[in-house]
Every structure is written in C-alpha cells, then in structure tokens.
Amino acid sequence: MIGRLNHVALAVPDLTEAAERYRTALGASVSEPQPLPEHGVTAVFVELDNTKIELLEPLGADSPIAAFLAKNPRGGMHHVCYEVSDIRAARDRLVASGARVLGDGEPKIGAHGKPVLFLHPSDVFGTLTELEEV
Ligand SMILES: CC[C@H](C(=O)O)C(=O)SCCNC(=O)CCNC(=O)[C@H](O)C(C)(C)COP(=O)(O)OP(=O)(O)OC[C@H]1O[C@@H](n2cnc3c(N)ncnc32)[C@H](O)[C@@H]1OP(=O)(O)O
Ligand SMILES: [Co+2]
C-alpha cells in the first residue's frame, strides 16, 4: 500500500534561517516559502535525489506545530510522508486496523496540491505520519 517516501518534515523556529543554512552550508536546492494558512504552516522543500525535506514554521495563532516547537525550541523531526495511490482506501484500511486519522478523516489538499491525511503518532510507533495521494 505505501509507496515512496515523499518527504521528511522538520519543524524549525526560523524558516528563513533554516532555508539559508540548507542552501549555503549544505549546498541544497530549496524552494521559495509556501504559506499554507489552511494548515497553519509556511513550508519550503529541500529537493534531494531520492526524496524531499520539508522545512516548516508555524503560521497563525493555531498552528498544529506550535506545541511541538514549544517542546523542541531548536526544532526537530516532525513527520514522515508516504505516497499512496488511493488515499481513501489507505485510510479505510488503517482505520480498520485501529489507527486514528487526524481531523475529520477527510483528505485535505497539501503543499503539493494533492490529497493528504495524517495518522496519530501514537498509532504509528510515535512518529506523526502523513499520507499523500499521488
Ligand atoms: C499538509 C501540508 C503539509 C504537507 O506536507 O503537504 C504538511 O505536512 S503540514 C504539517 C502540519 N500539520 C500537521 O502536523 C497536522 C497533523 N498534526 C496534528 O494534528 C497535531 O500536530 C497532533 C495532533 C499530532 C499533535 O498536536 P499537539 O502537539 O497540539 O497535541 P499534544 O501536544 O496533545 O500531542 C499529543 C501527543 O502527540 C505527541 N506529538 C505531537 N506532535 C508530534 C509529532 N510531530 N511527532 C510525534 N509525536 C507528536 C505529543 O508528544 C503527545 O504525546 P503524549 O505522549 O500524549 O504526550
Ligand atoms: Co508534510
């Protein structure tokens, strides 16, 4: 069911500083900032040969990553994202296995313009897990 690793997301306290560090010290190709108000974050993507790194900073008062950054003020690994071909079938299979889907359970459009869902970290061994339909 799950396919490629689409991205690994890092929450950072300062997106501009993090993007610049990836560009200069790590020599990476980094996208321009992408505000995602419906998700409460601003994101950039670091393009790698085999996957992407998503750098995230909070956007707005109700950002879902604010509590994470309060606990991890220097930033930290926030979630992984796997690709699936049918996100509703994947959701239904995971819910049938006892996993909780966050939000109202309906896929939302993510940073890549594709439907995404999140599984509660407690149901996937402590790692917040995103699915993206490709
Ligand atoms: C979709 C656009 C973009 C894309 O790729 O396209 C993105 O990826 S946007 C990413 C930002 N959006 C989300 O993360 C949405 C899903 N996340 C959530 O709904 C929350 O972050 C949630 C529910 C996972 C945690 O919310 P919050 O931290 O406010 O709640 P708690 O503090 O009560 O935490 C509950 C429990 O979960 C543990 N936790 C929290 N965040 C993480 C994490 N990133 N990885 C692992 N575990 C996490 C937290 O420590 C608590 O554990 P407990 O043992 O109960 O103390
Ligand atoms: Co993501």
Image (spheres, helix red, strand yellow):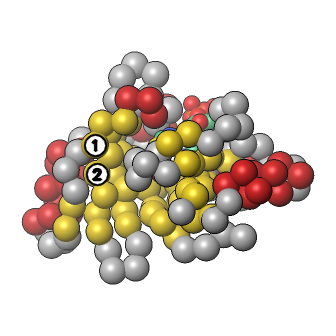
**Where is ligand 1, by quadrant?**
top right
Residue identifier under label 1: 34
Q: Residue furthest top?
A: 61
The spot of residue 70 in percent (x, y) is 43, 33
The answer to whether residue 115 is above or below residue 132 is above
Q: Residue furthest left?
A: 24
Which amino acid, by three-letter code, is at mark 2?
A: Val
Identify the residue shown where x is 29% and y is 68%. Answer: 47
The answer to whether residue 35 is above or below residue 56 is above
Q: Residues within 10 Å of mark 2 (few under 14, many from 20)?
A: many
Report whether residue 66 is seen: no
The spot of residue 7 in percent (x, y) is 45, 63
Which amino acid, by three-letter code, is at mark 1?
A: Gln
Ligand 1 is within 8 Å of the C-beta of the residue at disc 2: no
Q: Residue furthest bottom?
A: 49
Query: For this view, does 102 lie left or right of residue 133?
Result: right
Identify the residue shown where x is 76% and y is 56%. Answer: 89
Residue identifier under label 2: 44
Query: For this view, does 102 lie left or right of residue 18?
Result: right
Which disc is residue 121 wearing?
none
- Name the element at disc 1: strand
Query: For this view, does 108 lie left or right of residue 46?
Result: right
Name the N-terminal-most of marks 2 and 1: 1
Report whether residue 57 is seen: yes
The spot of residue 67 in percent (x, y) is 49, 31
The spot of residue 115 in percent (x, y) is 55, 48
**Front residue of 69 and 119:** 119
